[in-house]
Image: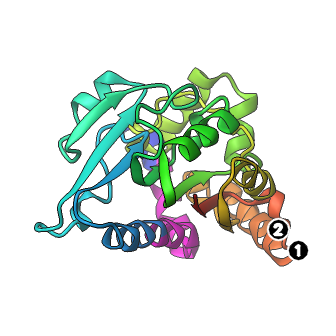
Amino acid sequence: MSYLHRFLQANRRLSTRFDRRRDAALYARYDDDVANALFSITEGGLVADIGGGRTCSFADRLIGTHDIKIVAVDVSADELAANSTAHETRVADVSRHIPFADSEVDLLVSRTLLEHVPDVESAVREMARVLKPNGQTLHLLPCRYALFAIVARITPFDLAKRLLHVTIPESRGVVEFDVFYDHGHPRELKRVFSSAGFREVDIEYTWDQTAYFHAFFPLFLLVLLYQRLAELCRIRVLASYAIVRATR
């Protein structure tokens, strides 16, 4: 084990002891929301997981007798080839076209996809087109003005990715695609979904983001202080992660 590896591991252990990781709770709420939405779909319903990639994280929430079809949609055929959790896969660029007929989909979800979409407004209009009336959509995404997002946008992506893979080894194979963070903060997300015809648009968000900085304990402490100040001042534009819930 190299000295750098030992140094990073020691910093991660120390940071973890001080970190409550409330962003992880947001991920858990997203999974619970998707599970609840699944149970509201009638037999024979259709669920679209856009950016479904290698796995549909909610697939194990389906009851065996509940006859619902999951279709994973992704721009990468290689990613979809590894997906064994969806009933069907379709290759598509969702900012241009979501491959379903008008009003065909009961539930449309995405998990850490929208930050990779260069034209979120176009993608949201496509969501509105394919969803049935009263259909639901749920999205979990990192936000544009999170500290890690700012770094990712101002640093050449290949360099940022290599640094991330060194400091967070488990990000290999997970963080591989370029990011845009188009319209990626709470106020803009609500505007974009409302403008596309969605109603009951709710945005839940958090400022927590310290996991990206665990490998350097002094920096972790500064980020922890920053996010607590942003939360205390309720500065929505500085949110780090958001869940979008909306009804067609």
Residue 226: percent from left, percent from top: 79, 64
Mark 1 Cα-neighbour bin, 10 Å: few <14, some 14–19, many ≥20 = few
Instruction: Inspect the magenta stretch and tell me whether residue 16 lies in it.
Output: yes
Name the residue located 58 percent from the left edge and 42 percent from the top edge.
Answer: 114
The residue pinned by badge 1 equals 233
Q: On the image, which quarter does residue 91 sit in?
A: top left
The location of residue 190, given as percent across then percent down, is 74, 57
Residue depicted at 29% across the width and 39% down the height:
54
Q: Is residue 197 visible?
A: yes
Provide the residue span drawn in magenta.
Answer: 7-29
Instruction: Please tell me whether residue 217 is drawn above or below residue 119 in the rendered image.
Output: below
* In-image side of 179 versus 162 (left or right): right
User: In this rendering, is residue 53 above or below 15?
Assistant: above
Q: Amino acid at mark 1?
A: Cys
Q: Nearer the viewer, residue 180 or 174?
A: 180
**Residue placed most toward the observer, 116 or 101:** 101
**Magenta span contains residue 123:** no
| SS of the residue under disc 1 | loop
Q: Is residue 34 above or below residue 215?
A: below
Q: Which mark is residue 14?
A: none
Residue at screen point 32% across, 30% down: 90
Task: Determine which residue is flagged by label 2.
Answer: 230
Left/right of residue 221 with respect to residue 142 in the rendered view: right
